[in-house]
Amino acid sequence: MHESDDPAAVTRRLTELRQEHRDLDAAIARLALLDADPNDELTLKRMKKRKLWLKDCIARLESALIPDTPA
């Protein structure tokens, strides 16, 4: 059985990704409040890109947990 076939493994991975997403969201908010200098702008953009990637991964894994049902 492949890890992605195991609902418990997918759920664990989802939990990890959601936590990282929340942590990034908080870090982005803190950095934005500091009125970042130009060097921080690049960091902020990278963090936002990573956050979007995490959101996509979470959506993909959530859809993998939905059982296929015949129409």
Image (cartoon, rainbow, N blue to C red):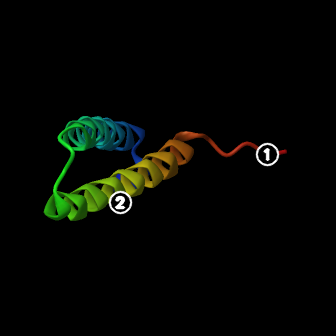
Could you say which quadrant of the image residue 16 lies in? top left
Q: Is residue 37 left or right of residue 52?
A: left
Mark 2, residue position: 49
Dot 1: element: loop
Q: Quadrant of residue 8?
A: top left
Q: Is residue 8 visible?
A: yes
Residue at 16% x, 56% y: name it. Answer: 37
Which three-letter amino acid code belongs to the residue tagged 1?
A: Pro
Give the label on residue 70, or none.
1
| Disc 1 crowd, CA 10 A, few/some/many (<14, 14-19, 20+) | few
Give the quadrant of the N terminus.
bottom left
Q: Nearer the viewer, residue 51 or 14?
A: 51
Q: Is residue 34 left or right of residue 48?
A: left
Q: Nearer the viewer, residue 34 or 42?
A: 34
Quadrant in which the C terminus appears: top right
User: Where is residue 13 shown, x and y percent of the image?
Assistant: 31, 44
Assess disc 2: are there few (<14), some (14-19) or many (≥20) residues with their C-alpha within 10 Å of its C-alpha. Answer: few
For label 2, the SS is helix
Q: CA distance from mark 2 to mark 1?
A: 36 Å
